[in-house]
């Protein structure tokens, strides 16, 4: 699809990791017509001057007939019409580009306050688990689907990678229990990859994964102490 432009536009879908943008680009060479008028013909014809005939006296001369003057007929010169303008087939280059910015993300956790040691904390991201773009470029419908991958760092040396965004209680997809009290910095790295389809062709999105980073801080308090008799 991206190499053959004979039957339709060349479509390319790729990412720009520096700007976190998805780029859909299309190019096409379409035949066009150009009219090239011919220059008007230059006529160099100049009519010859007619001879001057002197008047003949209207008197009779004995034994001499009156001379007859013979004039040569010359048809008028017809102007030639300009030829029809020549039609030349040319190629018109068309191109278009569509950009989409992937949505940002934030780290959310529960409980928002009063997190204690030994009690699981529920983490999730407000990013959707699917990013989809359906658009038309140069008359071609393009459908792009991007999926995220979530890499968590809970700040105490524990990491976790998943394809789910997680959720609040009772969604226990992403939970973590801290063993020691303190303030921890949570880091989340989201990597977006995907594929696109157009006119029956399915291909991966090139350009590398778009990586988004988010951070949050959590304060963990000491857990309750159990007293036994």
Image (spheres, rainbow, N blue to C red):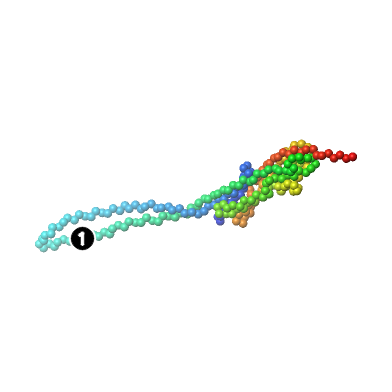
Residue 218 position, x and y percent, is: 73, 39
Q: Residues within 10 Å of mark 1 (few under 14, many from 20)?
A: few
Residue situated in front as seen by the camera: 111 or 44 = 111
Q: Give the quadrant of the C terminus.
A: top right
Residue situated in front as seen by the camera: 166 or 211 = 166
| Residue 130 shown left or right of residue 42 in the figure | right
Residue situated in front as seen by the camera: 127 or 171 = 171
Residue 221 position, x and y percent, is: 78, 38
| Residue 123 shown left or right of residue 199 in the figure | right
| Residue 41 shown left or right of residue 223 in the figure | left
Rendered view: 120 above or below 51: above
Residue 51 visible at all:
yes
Q: Furthest residue to the right?
A: 229
Residue 179 visible at all:
no
Residue name at image x 32 percent, y 53 percent: 43
Q: Mark 1 = which residue?
A: 70
Residue name at image x 65 percent, y 49 percent: 131
Determine the image quadrant of residue 73: bottom left
Residue name at image x 70 percent, y 43 percent: 107
- How many marks can you see? 1
Rendered view: 213 above or below 195: above
Determine the image quadrant of residue 216: top right
SS for tag 1?
A: loop
Residue name at image x 26 percent, y 59 percent: 74
Q: Furthest residue to the top?
A: 182
Residue situated in front as seen by the camera: 63 or 68 = 68
Residue 217 position, x and y percent, is: 72, 38
Residue 213 position, x and y percent, is: 68, 42
């Amino acid at each position: 699809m991206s190499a053959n432009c004979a039957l339709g536009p060349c479509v390319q879908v790729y990412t720009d990791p520096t700007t976190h943008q998805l780029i859909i680009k299309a190019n096409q060479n379409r035949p066009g017509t150009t009219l090239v008028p011919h220059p008007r013909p230059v006529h160099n014809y100049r009519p010859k001057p007619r001879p001057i005939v002197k008047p003949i006296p209207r008197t009779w001369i004995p034994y001499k007939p009156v001379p007859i003057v013979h004039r040569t007929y010359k048809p008028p010169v017809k102007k030639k019409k300009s030829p029809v303008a020549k039609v030349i087939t040319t190629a018109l280059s068309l191109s278009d580009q569509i950009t989409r910015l992937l949505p940002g993300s934030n780290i959310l956790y529960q409980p928002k306050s009063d997190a204690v040691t030994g009690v699981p904390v529920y983490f999730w991201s407000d990013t959707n688990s699917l990013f989809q773009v359906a658009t038309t470029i140069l008359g071609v419908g393009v459908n792009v689907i991007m999926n995220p991958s979530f890499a968590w760092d809970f700040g105490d040396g524990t990491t976790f990678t998943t394809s789910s965004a997680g959720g609040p209680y009772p969604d226990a997809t992403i939970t973590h229990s801290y063993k020691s009290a303190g303030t921890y910095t949570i880091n989340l790295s989201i990597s977006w990859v995907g594929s696109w389809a157009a006119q029956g062709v399915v291909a991966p999105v090139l350009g590398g994964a778009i990586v988004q980073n988010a951070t949050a801080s959590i304060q963990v308090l000491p857990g309750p102490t159990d007293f036994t008799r």
